[in-house]
Amino acid sequence: MRAVGSTVTRHRGATLGAALVGGSADVLDFLVPLWVGTELGATPAQIGALVGVELALSFAARPVAGRLADTRERTRVAAAGALLYALSCLGYALAPGLGAAFAASVAGGVGGALLWVSVRAVTAERLAEDDGAFADLYSAVAFASWFFWVPSLVLLPALGYRGVLAALGVTCLVAAVTLLRTVRRPPTAPASDATAWSDVRRLSPLLGVVGLTSVAEAGVGLLLLLHLQRAFELEVHEIALVFLPGGIAMTVLPRVLHRVTARHGRRAVYATASAASAVFATSLALAPGPVVVAALWVLTAAAWAALTPIHEAAVAELSGTRTGRGMSLLGNAALAGGAVGSVVAGALYGATSWQAVCAVLAGVIAAGAVAGPLALRRLGVADRPERVPAA
């Protein structure tokens, strides 16, 4: 039996590594499209292809990442992912042209899959002692995401795009070293010969809801970004300030909301959080200015801070010794939903009214308020968080 102190050290190392890469990734996702357009002369179609390549590789690599997380030392798999992500950032910083930029996007897609599947599998190990472990992970990554924006925006005029991208690469290297220094644990082999497809079918009610939720999340995020830029004519730093209250909420609320979940049950919290997010999407259509939008954004941020840990903990409980596979399926459901949400929101924003798009996304979110609790009940997930036996 391993000591509690070792488990905490392992959990903290994985959480820190995820926060360092996650914060870097958020800045990278924002800067790279701007950078390849202004400095490499990429067309909008080429920028879209660059983003698409990373998403496609991340999707394709997740099943392999899940297998590795179940059969190899998870923190080492996560370290390999952080290293690949560092190479992606440094590749962008040194890229002489679009060919090198596409190679960097490939490294980022594969690295992200290895890191996030493995880190979530490590976090699932902690559920045996702390049923709020996924809330802590969400909080740490959310903190890094908005905290990294401050030095990045401050340093951008002085260092330029390449200098900031290189600094993000160094940060990801620190994450890889951190993960390599965590306490090791013997790998967990799958307990059965169940195929990936059988797990997809078994988890399909929850995976479908996660995909639906991700459609709304990505759609609302893109919609808000476009509206702030075009309707209110805000600059980059002004847009960041609108998102900041939501980022702070996602940092401080996950553990608080987990206690609410433990008291009132997952299904009730799921329905309430989704309803609050639907209210936000509806209210966007009537928001008179950025200050009101920033206040409303906190509602959606709080909803995500409640729902995401519920998804992850539920998959951990249902996956048994195949936690890596479960997390890979969860990640791909979210990735597919996010891609659909971005495409749909962008298309509707250009083809119809702002109010109509808000109504469509609010309807999707409201559907999740009904479908989520039903999926949890159908799968037999405990309504209140439980300590999960260590795999």
Image: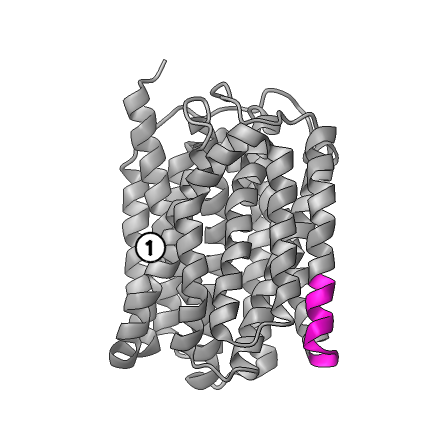
Give percent across and percent down for residue 302: 51, 50
How many callouts does the rendering have?
1
Q: Residue at x 43, y 33 (%)?
A: 133
> In the picture, residue 44 is in which quadrant?
bottom right
Q: Is residue 352 within the magenta segment?
A: yes
The colour scheme used to paint the residues is: one colour
Judged from the image, the secondary structure of the residue bearing numbered disc 1 is: helix
Q: Is residue 133 left or right of residue 309?
A: left
**Region in magenta:** 350-361
Q: Residue furthest left?
A: 158
Quarter the N terminus occupies: top left
Residue 354 in magenta stretch: yes
* Residue 364 showing in the rendered view: yes
Secondary structure, magenta segment, majority class: helix
Number of residues whose C-alpha sits closer than 10 Å to that of mark 1, classed few (under 14), some (14–19) or many (20 or more): many
Q: Quadrant of residue 244?
A: bottom left
**Residue sitting at x 47%, y 20%:** 390
Closer to the camera in the image, 151 or 264: 264
The foreground one among 24 and 368 is 368
Give the residue type that dot 1 points to. Cys
Q: Nearer the viewer, residue 326 or 194?
A: 326
Q: Visible in this render: residue 83?
A: no
Residue found farthest to the top: 1
Rendering coords of residue 213 (x, y %): 65, 51
- Residue under label 1, please give it: 172
Q: Residue at x 72, y 36 (%)?
A: 375
Compared to 217, does 201 lie above or below? above
Find residue 103 and report its horizontal and vertical position in percent. 48, 66
Locate residue 376, reporting x and y percent: 68, 33
